[in-house]
Image (cartoon, coloured by chain):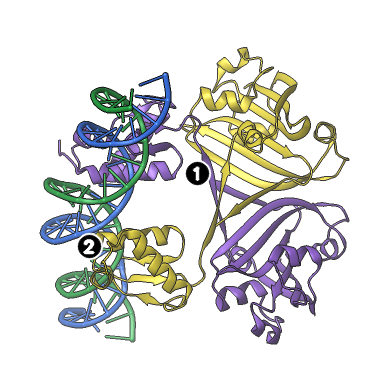
Chain colours: A yellow, B purple, C blue, D green
Amino acid sequence: MGDEKTSFRDVKADLLGRILARVWAPGDLVPGEVELAAEFGVARATVNRAMRELTEEGLLERRRKAGTRVRPSPLRAARFEIPLVRAEIEAAGQAYGYRLIGRAVTPPPGWLAARLSLAPGARVLHLTCLHSADGAPYQFEDRWISLAALPEVEAEPFDRIGPNEWLIRAVPFSEVEISFLATAAEGEVASALDCREGEPVFTVERTTWWQGQAITHVRLSFARGHRMTTRY
Amino acid sequence: MGDEKTSFRDVKADLLGRILARVWAPGDLVPGEVELAAEFGVARATVNRAMRELTEEGLLERRRKAGTRVRPSPLRAARFEIPLVRAEIEAAGQAYGYRLIGRAVTPPPGWLAARLSLAPGARVLHLTCLHSADGAPYQFEDRWISLAALPEVEAEPFDRIGPNEWLIRAVPFSEVEISFLATAAEGEVASALDCREGEPVFTVERTTWWQGQAITHVRLSFARGHRMTTRY
DNA sequence: GGGCTGGTTATGGTCAGACAAATAGACGGG
DNA sequence: CCCGTCTATTTGTCTGACCATAACCAGCCC
């Protein structure tokens, strides 16, 4: 009967089991690292890693000297991967299609200037385009790019590849804000996505900065019935 | 000119800087752990932790023997915390209100039986209720609970506290699937949320299992204009 | 050429020991 | 009784050494 080696994974699974089985109830103080290390017959570092990961996953709460306790109501966090549209469509085994609808250099509308903290007199590139899967409309992209932050974008036609792909390749970014919301399809969005006016549309808004300077803001509207899903 | 101690945080920040500044371009192979450890004057374990975290954040890709490389297109993952409605509202400094609208024990509709893999003849508890903030409708909850999995729930009136809060306290769960989508407000949902028929509504659907057995399915519809936001 | 085999090497993980940082709780002075 | 200080305890992190595991690759045999 071999004594198998225990890894931090084993310890983690065991601790998780005790939490889920309510051996340690929510709010309870759990034994300290040294004690658990002795119990499992492993080094404290191993217990530490197991507990640290459980903490990151929102199941434990740790404070120096106060000890570790089970989170009263497990803080559940959902992780959504934000893939490139093209990759997302091709991963589903469908043919990716791209069409540029509009391209214009303009002064920014007020809400955009405020959101991106643009200087008065700044100019932005405004692009609208449609991504399709097997010929069916999939996502309508309404993008604004700051020409102050990214002058070279003015030379880019964007008739073959989407601004998303171009941007990811061309510029890094350090800060991102993403929102999920529901909007009503209107005008250009409705016609591009081939749906009725006022129809509910799942929408993602994303603003991106690089070293404090705003680069781009985009509103992505998905075709009818789209949902973002995650399991854990 | 003190030589301060370097921590895995310093290493991580430095590496992140090089990635963002394209010192190491996307797709590039980066130096091995031993080499970097020597460069920074720290133990290999320290470099390992820094790189491991960057990998978890989707910036690096690691494979044994093959080495570590910068992700070609940074896999960006958004983390959304899913708080208790009550906590969410109270955190915003508003008064939380709860009202039970409907409560019935019924056989499950077909789509639900399929989704929860319910046996023929199974019964479910169907609850509808409204969460409000400062008196204004905030979230409409349409919940189904499997009585096979959780018989004691039948004795619960749910007239004072919401099923969400009760469930979190009463039962653990091991697996969750969450979807975000946009729906049109209809019937009960529209009247509870005080909006027009057909108005777009941000919706979250969540199904929960415990040790392979389905516990509950819920559809949460938010009031007009609601958005889920995250920064990173 | 094709396929198997083993060596090499980078990352993955464990360990024991040490020190650092935070802070709950005891203690003491006003 | 209140408030500040001190200390003991707990988690946080680093180190350097070691073994484990995966997989690229060269060399071998057929």
Farthest residue to the top: give it.
Answer: A155
Q: Are marks 2 and 1 on the same chain?
A: no
Which quarter of the figure is the C terminus of chain A placed in?
A: bottom right
- Percent of width and height locating residue B187: 88, 63
Please tell me which residue is depicted at 25% across the width and 59% down the height of the picture. A45
In the rendered structure, the answer to whether residue A112 lies left or right of residue B140 reads: left
Mark 2 belongs to which subunit?
Answer: A
Which quarter of the figure is the N terminus of chain A placed in?
A: bottom left
Q: Is residue B137 above or below residue B162?
A: above
- Percent of width and height locating residue A190: 83, 36
Q: Is residue A115 above or below residue A159?
A: below
Cβ–Cβ under 8 Å for marks 2 and 1: no
- Percent of width and height locating residue B189: 82, 63
* Kind of residue indicated by mark 2: Ala
**Picture quadrant where residue B196 is located:** bottom right
According to the image, label 1 marks what residue?
B232
Whether residue A51 is visible here, answered yes or no, is: no
**What SS does tag 1 mark?**
loop
Whether residue B84 is visible here, answered yes or no, is: yes
**What SS does tag 2 mark?**
loop
Badge 1 density bin: few <14, some 14–19, many ≥20, Cα 10 Å: few
In the rendered structure, the answer to whether residue B45 lies left or right of residue A199 reads: left
Q: Is residue A158 above or below residue A20?
A: above
How many numbered circles are shown? 2
* Kind of residue indicated by mark 1: Tyr
- Percent of width and height locating residue B182: 75, 50
**Picture quadrant where residue A177 is located:** top right
Mark 1 belongs to which subunit?
Answer: B
According to the image, label 2 marks what residue?
A43
Separation (CA) of disc 2 from disc 1: 34 Å
- In depth, the one of A42 and B30 nearer the eye is A42
